[in-house]
Amino acid sequence: ELKVEQNPLFLSMQEGKNYTIYCNYSTTSDRLYWYRQDPGKSLESLFVLLSNGAVKQEGRLMASLDTKARLSTLHITAAVHDLSATYFCAVVRDGGSQGNLIFGKGTKLSVKP
Amino acid sequence: DAGVTQSPTHLIKTRGQHVTLRCSPISGHKSVSWYQQVLGQGPQFIFQYYEKEERGRGNFPDRFSARQFPNYSSELNVNALLLGDSALYLCASSFGVRVYEQYFGPGTRLTVT
């Protein structure tokens, strides 16, 4: 069974600090997604990582993928309050229905002034 | 260009009742997936439909069913509602069954009392 684990589940940061969220998955997958969710809202796509060593950056967020280690990281640089949200990683099972995303439990990020 | 739309936005039902949730995908998208997100958890895959055929099913009881119409819109039906069915139900659309990007709708918040 494909499992996705994120850590930490809760993260309280000060503005201006850096931190990394980790996403481990248990079996092979050919793509990994990062989503952001604000309270009471839907999911906003942040990154799609398709290959080993893939790195994508958008503003203060940078995501990377190591398929051999089955690990993705979401690095936050110089956090600002607007980044406060819950962040989910999700993977697609190799060979499975490509609409079938398996999500982690999410990391709730709170950025304090 | 309109994104994924879902109706209704909020819904309150009583245990044992039946509910129908609706989703319209982005124009041109032929695949619709349904997810259930219980408070504090990541979304869980329920169904994927592509070209009106079921292409994937998650680990949900037979009380859950869905269908897709010729215009690619979709309905999710839940019978004999339980308190545990209270959740945010998310619909996601993509162009094909092998998705690169999935776009999520705003969700329907279902409360079962």
Image: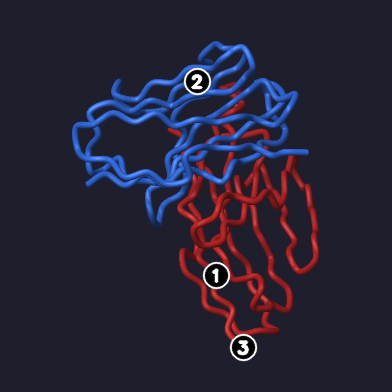
Secondary structure of the residue carrying numbered label 3? loop
Alpha carbon separation for disc pair 3 and 2:
44 Å
- Tell me residue B32's x, y (percent): 58, 26
Q: Look at the image and name its color scheme.
A: by chain
- Tell me residue A39's x, y (percent): 51, 62
| Three-letter code for the amino acid on which mark 2 is drawn | Gly
Instruction: Tell me the residue that label 1 is attached to.
Output: A109
Q: Quadrant of the C terminus of chain A?
A: bottom right
Same chain letter for marks 3 and 2: no
Closest to the observer, B57 or A67: B57
Total residue callouts: 3
Q: Residue at x 65, y 70 (%)?
A: A83
Chain identifier for the red-coloured part of the image: A
**Is B10 left, or right, of B29 in this rendering?**
left
Check whether the beta carbons of the residues at disc 2 and disc 1 lie within 8 A of each other: no
Instruction: Tell me the residue that label 2 is attached to.
Output: B56
Instruction: Tell me the residue that label 3 is attached to.
Output: A113
